[in-house]
């Protein structure tokens, strides 16, 4: 589905950075819409933490260096049109309702929600950025340690290696492949309707 959102030039540059990171991780082209879809699907790691604490930590996390990317973004406009899944749209709307209580504000714009999703995805994709930002937050460190212990105990009790990242990578790739197929079908249907 096509989704239009007003985002800052900074968020546009962050979207470009996350798109490049997913392309590098997958070894194939990833559209900006597919990058946002993947970022939303990759939000599951945040559920291991207290909602308020993790999203405050993500909000406080400084943006990565975007100076080399600004040149590639459209400085004239800050409206972006993306092909995204219904899950992504619904998740954006859900967080648009829940993040104001975390940030102690009356409302949060869609562009802010998208920026925070992209920051969360970049944290997940780039361990160095994780260490530089959330690695300094004592609450997050304590919860990460507790979650690591819980995960290792669970893996040893099941006698199975617990590899969630591989499962998430498969889900993300499947979502990307489905989006590509749907986009191709839309294009073909559009061509047929023009004839």
Image (spheres, rainbow, N blue to C red):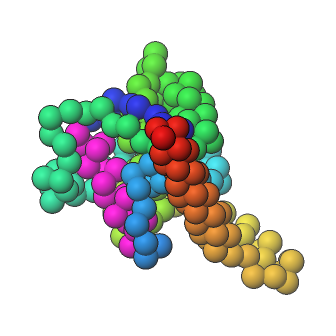
Report which quarter residue 65 is drawn in: bottom left
Question: Does 172 appear in magenta?
Answer: no
Write the residue at 41% across / 25% down.
109
Please report the bounds of the magenta region as a residue range.
9-25
Judge whether residue 63 can be spotted in this image. no
Report which quarter residue 162 is drawn in: bottom right
Judge whether residue 83 can be spotted in this image. yes
Image x and y of residue 157, in percent: 86, 77
In this view, which residue lies farthest toward the front? 195
Main SS class of the magenta portion in the image = helix
Q: Nearer the viewer, residue 135 or 81?
A: 81
Image x and y of residue 32, in percent: 39, 51
Write the residue at 37% across / 59% down.
19
Write the residue at 39% across / 73% down.
24
Image position of 65 with respect to 187: above or below: below
Image x and y of residue 38, in percent: 52, 55
The answer to whether residue 150 is left or right of residue 60 is right
Image position of 93 with respect to 26: above or below: above
The answer to whether residue 72 is left or right of residue 36 is left
Write the residue at 64% across / 74% down.
166
Q: Nearer the viewer, residue 42 or 34?
A: 34
């Amino acid at each position: 589905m096509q989704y239009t959102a007003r985002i800052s030039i900074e968020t546009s540059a962050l979207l470009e950075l996350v798109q490049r990171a997913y392309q590098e991780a997958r070894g194939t082209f990833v559209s900006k819409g597919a990058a946002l879809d993947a970022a939303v699907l990759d939000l599951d790691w945040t559920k291991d933490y207290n909602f308020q604490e993790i999203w405050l930590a993500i909000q406080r996390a400084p943006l990565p260096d975007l100076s080399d990317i600004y040149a590639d973004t459209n400085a004239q406009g800050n409206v972006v049109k993306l092909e995204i899944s219904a899950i992504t749209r619904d998740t954006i709307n859900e967080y648009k309702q829940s993040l104001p209580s975390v940030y102690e504000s009356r409302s949060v714009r869609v562009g802010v929600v998208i920026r925070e999703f992209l920051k969360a995805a970049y944290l997940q994709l780039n361990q160095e950025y994780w260490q530089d930002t959330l690695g300094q937050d004592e609450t997050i460190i304590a919860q990460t340690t507790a979650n690591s212990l819980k995960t290792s105990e669970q893996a040893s009790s099941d006698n199975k290696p617990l590899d969630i990242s591989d499962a998430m990578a498969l889900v993300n790739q499947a979502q990307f492949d489905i989006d590509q197929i749907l986009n191709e079908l839309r294009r073909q249907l559009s061509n047929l309707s023009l004839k």
